[in-house]
Amino acid sequence: LTTSRESDTRTRVRAEVANVGQRPAAMVEVRVSGSVQYVADDALFWLEPGEKQTVNVRIRTNAQGLPAGTKFSATAWNAR
């Protein structure tokens, strides 16, 4: 994860998502935990086994930046 401030109220996080499984991952999306508003520049994409994709996530923040304990995860329709 790479984090940068875009403005006083917005932080951009650059996240790399990788499919470490042996099957394609369908409808992959990045999620952010907690009560934050966010939008990813790519969602519901496909990853072949071993493939990686970088996704930019823009998060509405306050002057302190990301809230403590903010966690990022990726999910896929066909993954546990």
Image (spheres, rainbow, N blue to C red):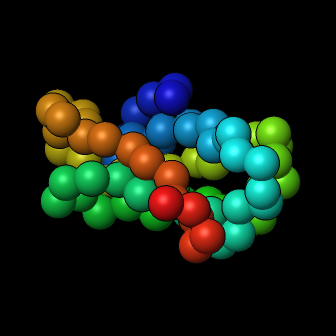
Q: Point out residue 79 in the picture as x, y percentages from the top left corner.
A: 57, 62
> In the drawing, does residue 50 fall left or right of residue 34?
right
Determine the image quadrant of residue 11: top left
For residue 15, which quarter of the picture? top right
Residue pictured at 71% horizontal, 61% vertical: 25
**Residue 63 seen in the figure:** no
Q: Residue at x 77, y 48 (%)?
A: 22
In the displayed structure image, the side of residue 1 where residue 26 appears, left or right: right
Residue occupying image coordinates x 19% and y 54%: 34
Q: How many marks?
A: 0
The residue depicted at 51 percent of the width and 52 percent of the height is: 74
Left or right placement of residue 73 versus residue 43 in this view = left
Residue 48 x/y as whole percent: 84, 54
Residue 18 in sight from this viewpoint: yes
Q: Nearer the viewer, residue 24 or 51?
A: 24
Q: Position of residue 59 (x, y in %)?
A: 37, 52
Q: Is residue 35 above or below residue 56?
A: below
From the viewer's perspective, is residue 50 above or below residue 27? Answer: above
Which quarter of the figure has residue 29? Answer: bottom right
